[in-house]
Image (cartoon, rainbow, N blue to C red):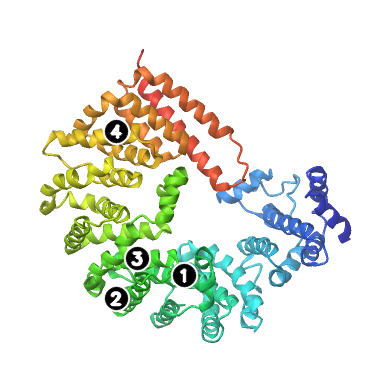
Amino acid sequence: MDLAPVIETLQATLSPQLRKQAEEKLAQICKTAGFIPCLVQIILNEQCDMGARQAGAIYLKNHINTYWSDFNDMKATTDPEIITLANAVNVNINKAAGDNTQKFFVISDSDKEYLRNVIIDAVIRAKDPLRCQLITTAGTMIKNDFPSKWPQFINQIHTCLSTDNIAACESALLIFYTLVQHYEYKKMEDRGPMDDVMFVILPLLHQRFMQLFAHNDSDQSAFIQKQILKIFHAYTQLHLSFRVLPTQTMATWLDTCCAVIERRLPDRLDALDEDDRAEHPWWKCKKWALHILIRTFERHGAPANLPKGQPPDRVEFANFYLKGFSGKVIGLVFGILEAYRQKLYLSPRVIQLSLNYLRESVRHAFSWKIMQNNIVVLIQDIIYPLLCINDDDIELFNEEPVEFVRARLDILDEYVSPVSAAELFLSEAVAKRKDVLMKTVSFLGTIIHNDTITAKQKDGVLHMLGVIGNVLIKKKAFVNQLENMIVQYLFPELQSQTAFLRARACYALRNFSKLEYSNNDNTARCLTYLINCLCNDTSLPVKVEAAMALNLFMSDTETGEKGKAIIVPHLQIIVMRIIEIIRQTEIDDVMIVLQKIVGLFDQELQPIAVQMTSQLVEFFKHVVCSENTSNDESKAEERTVAAMGVLNTLDTIVSCMGEKHE
């Protein structure tokens, strides 16, 4: 096939005026034998225009995704992915034998065989962004063809991993990772082909890793080491095959992860900006090593975590890990956190994962005994500083309050943030280990009584009180003192001159919402302060935290009934303020508060039901009609969630008010 007209057509797809005609032409010629070799030649030809090469790589990816699978020869299937794709291209994959209706186009066997033979080499030769598209293409081929139709794939990968060509090794690992991902979440009984592959490949991966670990400190070496750890994590995080990884072999890999954690990183990284450092392959090596150790502990390394009826090899490994290995890792993790304590740089994910490992250690008596002597230092010098607001957060709080609120309520934050990890660790420790609660309260008392306490330090105290509040109210030793503590330390901060302290005080009160106040005046004061923060405060984060706190004070408990009585006189302004917040932030958590209020106070809200509905309808129109000019998929998803939240709220209003004649 002549390359010139294909190049010209690909270039035309980049022009808005010519795109439609060019795409129609490509749709015709793409079904010609030899089209795929033609595209590959264009993609790899450095003399061609980069725009045409990128267009070719994207077209190849989409072409393979659509036309690689042969639906014509498939038997009846219930696979939802196949049915969806077949319906999209109007193919009846369950047609009867002998049906002579028009068949769905499938890439020719010769073109398929050609691509199987060249795709790995193409990835090696290509540079980003072309390489990304080609890796995705290879992933589609693997999903459809491995192992039966592409038996030479593993030999191709093995050859690349065995060579001294570091670029070939890197590309092979990126492609191999797509295979591991394909099997990552499959059931144990469906992972046979992957286990067979890993029986051969894992020893080679470890050998290559150790060679680079010992003799190569280049950034490309770090990337390859990171990718090997990433592959190992994907392979082992759900299931362990003891045929492939008997206990001693697994221990070798775990020792390697420990060596990665201990390794001093190149001094040249110190010159990088902190954001760039966090994303650097050297720090990501530590991240993935910790991922492996945590997941091994959680999933495979503690007898108490195993389901009943496990085979002896799993139980043996769990005992080996907990009693023979967890202590070593705990020591390494404390070493990592000592660097944070000394104000040395650690990437946020390394801090977060280190705390996650210690959180798992708290759950088991054996590992808890190893770490318990360090718990006071951990709380004072690691957890508390992490839970104090920092300068970046204060700037975001003041300059971009909407983004501050969204960041604080981001459900994914739990999986990446050191602050969330500190919260989860503290919550687990005070709930599971009785001495930790007393030591934490004693430490907070020392800080709060310090005459030189700063606003940031006070924020940390309030933050920690909020985290441990749901445990404190269950302990007889503390419950009688909590009311005085709240009146003395939280109520004043609800009126603080510092906005972030007002917000934090509202947050802290959330976990004390079930506390039964002995003095009804204190119940009234608490709710009055929260209502004032919601309705009259000038700071958006304060309003949001107040709304979230009020939500928890409205319940079926005695305190909740008292709360509802106090709220009713202010109900209409509360609702209108919450709708304002929803319009400003588009946050689903606040919509849930509104839904609860409507459900609890349907009769009291009748006078403003029409006004509420009108404002929500206008907001819904705004959300669904707003153009996503940035083409940001995450923002589009946020708007979808916001739109669904509005619809749910409107449904609640209609359900509650629909039968009322007024």
Label of residue 355 in the image: 3
Residue highlighted by disc 4:
531
Does label 2 or label 1 sit earlier along the sequence?
1
Closer to the camera, 443 or 428? 443
* For marks 1 and 3 on the same chain, the one whose residue lies earlier in the sequence: 1
Which residue is identified by label 2? 319
Disc 2 marks which amino acid? Answer: Asn
Q: Earlier in the sequence, mark 1 or mark 4?
A: 1
- Identify the secondary structure beneath mark 4: helix
Kindly indicate whether the residue at mark 3 contacts the one at mark 2 (C-beta within 8 angstroms).
no
Instruction: Please name the residue that numbered disc 1 is placed on.
Output: 288
Q: Is residue 397 above or below residue 32?
A: above
| Crowding at mark 2 (Cα within 10 Å: few <14, some 14-19, many 20+) | some
Q: Amino acid at mark 1?
A: Trp
At label 4, the amino acid type is: Ile
Residue 240 in view, yes or no? no
Instruction: Kindly report the distance in space between the C-alpha atoms of the residues bearing marks 2 and 1.
Output: 23 Å
